[in-house]
Image (spheres, rainbow, N blue to C red):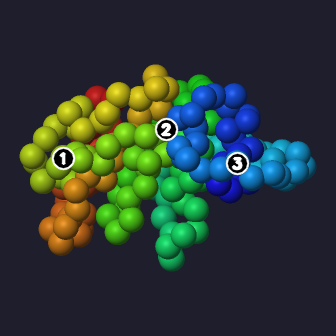
Amino acid sequence: MSRLEDALNKAYQSPAPTRLPGTPRQPSSAVGQASEIQSLSSLYTNIQLALPDVARPIIAFTSAVPKEGVTSILYHLGGLISREKKVLLVDFNILSPGLHKFMQVDNIKGLSDVLQGKKGLADCIPESLNPNLDVLPCGTTGAASFQILGSGVVRSLLGRDAQCL
C-alpha cells in the first residue's frame, strides 16, 4: 500500500473499504501523510474553481503509461468528494481495470456491458458501502471494447445517463 493510500485511509477514518484487502500497512511519516492529503484537497479545490457553473461535472483521468497511480488517485479523490456530493467512478481502463478492487466489488458486469447494450447502467453499479460513492466497473473486456470506446456510444452514455444518476 502506498503512503498516499495509508494517509487517506487514516483521514477518512473508515473501515476496510478504503484500502485493498490483504495489503500490509507501511509506516509513513505524519508530514508525508499531511502533504498527500493536502495535494488531493488542492486538486479537488482546483476542480471546483475550474468548473463553477457545472452542477454535475464529468471529469476524466488518464495516464500515458501503466502503474502511474491514476486508479488510486481517482479512488481517493472520489472518496474525498463523496463527503460532500454523490460520486460515480467509471472504470474506462480496458487494459487493466482496477477500481473494482478498491471498491471491493466484482468486475463481472460493468461499462462494457452498458456500452454493448447488454445491460442498463443501474444494473451494473454494485451496492457500495459508502452511500455517496459508487463505481461502474469496467466489466468483461475484449477486442470489441476498444471499438466501442471509440464510437459515439460513450458520448451518448455520458450525456444521457449523467442526468439520471
Look at mark 2 in the image and give the residue it sits on.
54
Look at mark 3 in the image and give the residue it sits on.
25
Label 1 to label 2: alpha-carbon separation = 25 Å
Quadrant position of the C terminus in the picture: top left
Quadrant position of the N terminus in the picture: bottom right
- Foreground mark, 1 or 2, reads 1
Which mark identifies residue 114? 1
| Residue occupying the far bottom of the picture | 65
> Reading the chain from its start, which is encountered first: label 1 or label 3?
3
User: Circle 1 sits in a helix, a strand or a loop, which is it?
Assistant: helix
Check if mark 3's residue and mark 2's residue have beta carbons within 8 Å. Answer: no
Amino acid carrying label 2: it is Val
- Foreground mark, 3 or 2, reads 3
Amino acid carrying label 1: it is Val
Residue 39 location, x and y as percent?
Answer: 75, 51
Determine the residue positioned at 23% across, 69% down: 146
Instruction: Say above or below: 109 vs 145.
Output: above
| Residue occupying the far left of the picture | 118
Residue 80 figure quarter: top right
> Reading the chain from its start, which is encountered first: label 3 or label 2?
3
Label 1 to label 3: alpha-carbon separation = 36 Å
User: Circle 3 sits in a helix, a strand or a loop, which is it?
Assistant: loop
